[in-house]
Image: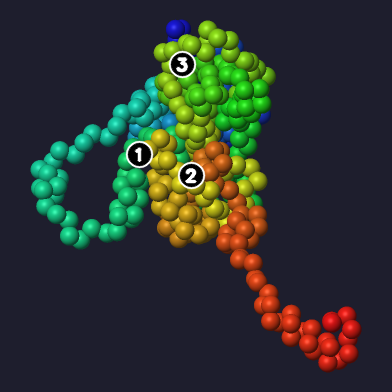
Amino acid sequence: MTNPPLSPTRMAAIGMDQRQRNALHMLFSTKCDNRYVLMEEDASEICILDLDVFGGERLWEEFRERHPQRPLILVSLKAREISDDVTLFVEKPIPVDRLIDAIEQQRRHLSAKIEDLAQPPPPDTSPRLAEQAEQPDTQQPPRKKRTARKAASLMSESMEWAFVGTSPDIDPKDPQQLAKIYYNPEHYLQGHMQLALNLAARHNKNVGVEGPWPAIRLYFEGRKIRVSAEERQLRPYCTIPDAILKVPLRFLDEEENAAGGAREYSIDAFHWQLALWASRGRLPKGTDLFRPVYLRRWPNFTRLVVTPYALAIAALWAEQPRSLIDTAQTLNIPQRYVFAFYSAAKAIQMAGETRCAADTLPAPSAVEKPKHRGLLRRLMGRLRGDKKQI
């Protein structure tokens, strides 16, 4: 099996005009062989910030407030001493080789961080924990709350960064902040895989999803998906918008159907994970923050990526539909955890917004009309001389 292609690093240019951005586009596509791709800040992995623009120092300060741990490259005519271990400096005029070296250095830092995705947290073997295990816990909180907190602590910091992101809470009344929390699933691999599933269901055939990413094969009858790569090799392609433009879908032949040696997922688990990677704490375009959300069925958390507070959110929605904003306020958790869970649950049609009273209230039982009332009405009609009541 051939090695999958190296995934492009998502870059953002902050404080740069269109001429500078065009220069970066040309540099990345020619000399860098498309190893990097330029996009907006919210979807980026590494950022380049020009300190020489008006308010450059303020841009730097605000960037670090939004993204305390995101790799950053500062450029300026004036030399700077940087004490931040995730920030590098390149002095103007910018030598191309120096800039590429800085990007590669930050890319290695980023790769080392993502490597932790595959590493489970080490077990706590301290004597204190052993003593606690031997003693009965007589003051434990209710089981549901313990489970929710345990699930919230199982995901490492790097995993949370990849699946949920780091976006701060927004003011729903601010249009500018509101615009930042939405994404269009159709522009990501998530939407393309949904097209593949629709095609497979319509023709009852297995489908191959071709693209610059590792090979993806959808086996409709067995409800399985096989990917010829590890998650860390596939994930970058799931976070780049419009990477699926002009990407064909094709039916698989018998030999490909029998191919092995790939990582296997259930269809629901794969779509759930693609939605988490694409959304990273955002919501599908058109989602109403204030319309109550209901849960169609309880998630099988043993087969899904469990994001922080997922169990608490599911329990709340199973009890009574609530809006996304109200859910975050009720549980006293950051909005991004609620948004990420809803995006994943909606991707596999497990959750949705209420559209009518039947989504939130049980259907009322039919009211049976008393038989005696009809008889009394007929008798009164006869006393009044109404022949139609006889």
Badge 1 crowding class, 10 Å Cα cut-off, few under 14, some 14 to 19, many 20 or more, is: some
Badge 3 crowding class, 10 Å Cα cut-off, few under 14, some 14 to 19, many 20 or more, is: many
* Tag 3 near tag 1, CB within 8 Å: no
Reading the image, the residue beneath label 2 is 341
Among the two numbered marks 3 and 2 on one chain, the one whose residue lies closer to the N terminus: 3
The C terminus lies in quadrant: bottom right
Residue 163 location (% of width, % of height): 45, 36
* Tag 3 near tag 2, CB within 8 Å: no
> Looking at the image, which is closer to me, 282 or 174?
282
**Image height check: is 339 above or below 251?**
below
Kindly state the secondary structure of the residue where label 2 is placed: helix
Reading the image, the residue beneath label 1 is 155
Reading the image, the residue beneath label 3 is 228
Q: In the picture provided, is 217 more to the left or to the right than 381? A: left
Among the two numbered marks 3 and 1 on one chain, the one whose residue lies closer to the N terminus: 1
Kindly state the secondary structure of the residue where label 3 is placed: loop
> What residue is rendered at 83% in x and 92% in y?
383
C-alpha separation, residue under disc 3 versus residue under disc 2: 27 Å
Residue 49 in sight: no
Q: Tag 2: residue type?
A: Phe
> What residue is rendered at 39% in x and 24% in y?
111
Q: Tag 3: residue type?
A: Ser
**Image height check: is 47 above or below 141?**
above
Select label 3 or label 1 by which is in front.
3
> What residue is rendered at 63% in x and 18% in y?
249
Residue 284 location (% of width, % of height): 60, 42
C-alpha separation, residue under disc 1 versus residue under disc 2: 14 Å
